[in-house]
Image (spheres, rainbow, N blue to C red):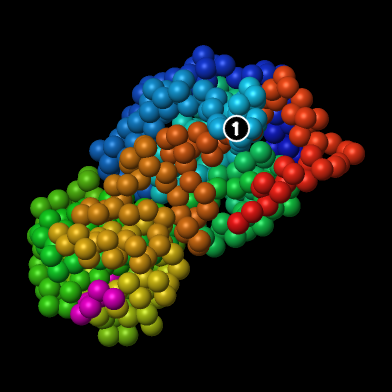
Amino acid sequence: MTRDEMLELLGRQRKSYLDEGEVSLAKRLDRIDRAIGLLVDNKDRLCEAMREDFGHRSIHQSMFTDVAGSIGPLKHARKHLARWMKPEKRKVDFPLNLLGAKARVEYQPLGVVGVISPWNFPVNLTFTPLAGILAAGNRCMIKPSEYTPATSELMAEIMGGAFDETEIAVITGDPQVGADFSGLPFDHLLFTGATSVARHVMRAASENLVPITLELGGKSPVIVGRSADMDKSAAAIMAGKTMNAGQICLAPDYVYVPKERIGEFVESSQRSVAKMFPTLLDNDDYTSVVNERHYERLNGYLDDAREKGAEIVEINPGDEDFRQQPGHKIPPTLILNADDSMKVMQDEIFGPLMPVKGYTDMNEVIDYVNDNPRPLGLYYFGKDDAEQRTVLSHTTSGGVTVNDVVMHVAQEDLPFGGVGPSGMGSYHGHDGFKTFSHAKSVFTQSKIDIAALAGLRPPYGEKLMKLLGGQITR
């Protein structure tokens, strides 16, 4: 689709939105129900499409993270929408509050919201934003990733069968289509993807002063305290690192472990991976790296780290030969003695590689985290409440999970978003409804003409000065 065609479609969506007028609760619920129905009715087709796009992707994982993981937020919005839509009463300042004046906030739809969704969770990160967008009463144009063409085309097909294109439209195409899409005059734009691409998206959106929510990523650190149960910690960390082969914006990127417990962490990690994946190459539960480019990028990190003195610990329970495979699977791999000269410590990894850094004092860990760009997530493991408080209060991240990884993103009553280079703004649950709504302040004056009584209109005089004298105080 050309830029002019997208502009024309945006114009039709906006006209349809304006012609509709106030968007009723019933209409919003109907649209949410249709989105849920698409996921339920097409769950198998969607999972197969994702499997095709990845070369190999666990059907169970896709059903869990992308299908069920999208239905949950939509159902949450459906359950709470009537309450979210109610105007919020606000306090009126003295003396107007005594004279019958009233104040409230009404949440209005923004209009047409654009969504640019990524390839790593192509269904989830397309449908989950719809919970807030549809709940708020908006129309939506979606540009899914060109890296998952089968899934993108299927979503365009099924959306087109359930929604008029003035309600929701899916636009597929190459990176140029995405670049043109990001420059459209939406009422709001949500982008999920890489920080490097986000800079271009934000620049394009700024031409039309389009408000933007950026869900990015970064190097989300794991901090294992001395009080942590190492077997439980390693099991959670490696489960997060191997889910979707580490291709998650919130994946644990690197781990800090007390120096004297690094060997214990390695052994616990090996046991936990062997328990989850006795084999890897022929294991339906272990996902492939999405394409050749990312496969080569990750192997390049390993080559670079090895050349610079890192110890590479490949966790390969079945002792399989990964050189002999039709796809792009990479075994979970620990990188010991990782330092900042290595590329794997400079870039977001987005794969099943885990640098391990040792520490003596927690302050050095906190300093390292704070010396680097603020991450999307941070994970602390341990039983020491005082240490936990110190870590959380002295670091800044989009969100935190304690004694697990990633799980804060699955809580619909928590906002999900980054900070600084890991993102801007947030959504999910009620916070998503507010993000995709305009909070309109409404003040209703009392029947008494307070402005005249208080001397607030010209000609000014002593009455006003007396009133101001009571306010201009320390």
407 relative to 95, above or below = below
Query: Can you say which quadrant of the picture contains the C terminus?
Result: bottom right
267 relative to 155, above or below = below
> In the image, is 88 to the left or to the right of 265?
right
Q: Which residue is mark 1?
A: 92
Query: Can you say which quadrant of the picture contains the N terminus?
Result: top right
Q: Secondary structure at mark 1?
A: loop
Give residue 318's position: percent from left, percent from top. 12, 59
**Residue visible at 61% across and 35% down?**
94
Mark 1 crowd level (few <14, some 14–19, many ≥20, 10 Å Cα): some
> In the image, is 449 to the left or to the right of 409?
right
Q: How many marks?
A: 1
39 relative to 462, above or below = above
Q: Which residues lie in the magenta part?
A: 352-363
Residue 317: quadrant of the picture: bottom left
252 relative to 105, above or below = below
